[in-house]
Image (cartoon, grey):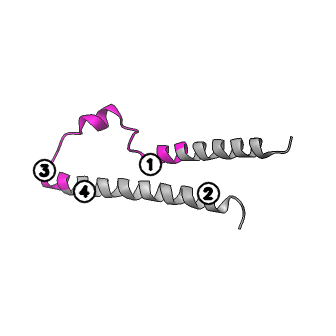
Amino acid sequence: MGIWTWPLMGIVVIVMAISAYSTIRVMNFEKKRQRVNDSPISEEVKEHPALFNPVFWVYILALGFMLLMIAYLALSSPN
């Protein structure tokens, strides 16, 4: 196993957990919505539509992970 295997596995688990949580929330919302037709969009989603998008969370986590690895490699180099 390489040095990147465990951090990558950690990121994958985090992304899977966030995606599963988001999916469960959407499923619960759909169940409630089926009971009441044409329910209004909540104010929270109207104000922040990208906040609950898991793709944006993946980009943010990947960027943080890359910055962490760049800092680690820069600080651990023998120069």
- Badge 3 crowding class, 10 Å Cα cut-off, few under 14, some 14 to 19, many 20 or more, is few
Residue 3 point in image, percent of width and height = 71, 60
> Which element is circle 1 on?
helix
The mark nearer the N terminus, 4 or 2, is 2
Q: Are marks 3 and 4 in contact (CB under 8 Å)?
A: no
- Badge 4 crowding class, 10 Å Cα cut-off, few under 14, some 14 to 19, many 20 or more, is few
- 55 relative position to 42: left or right: right
Q: Circle 3 sits on which residue?
A: 36
**Three-letter residue code for mark 1:** Pro
Q: Circle 2 sits on which residue?
A: 7
Mark 1 to mark 2 CA distance (whole Å): 19 Å
The mark nearer the N terminus, 1 or 3, is 3
| Quarter of the image where one finds residue 79 | top right
Residue 32 point in image, percent of width and height = 18, 54
Q: Which residues are magenta?
A: 32-60
Mark 1 to mark 3 CA distance (whole Å): 26 Å
Numbered tag placed on residue 54 in the rendering: 1
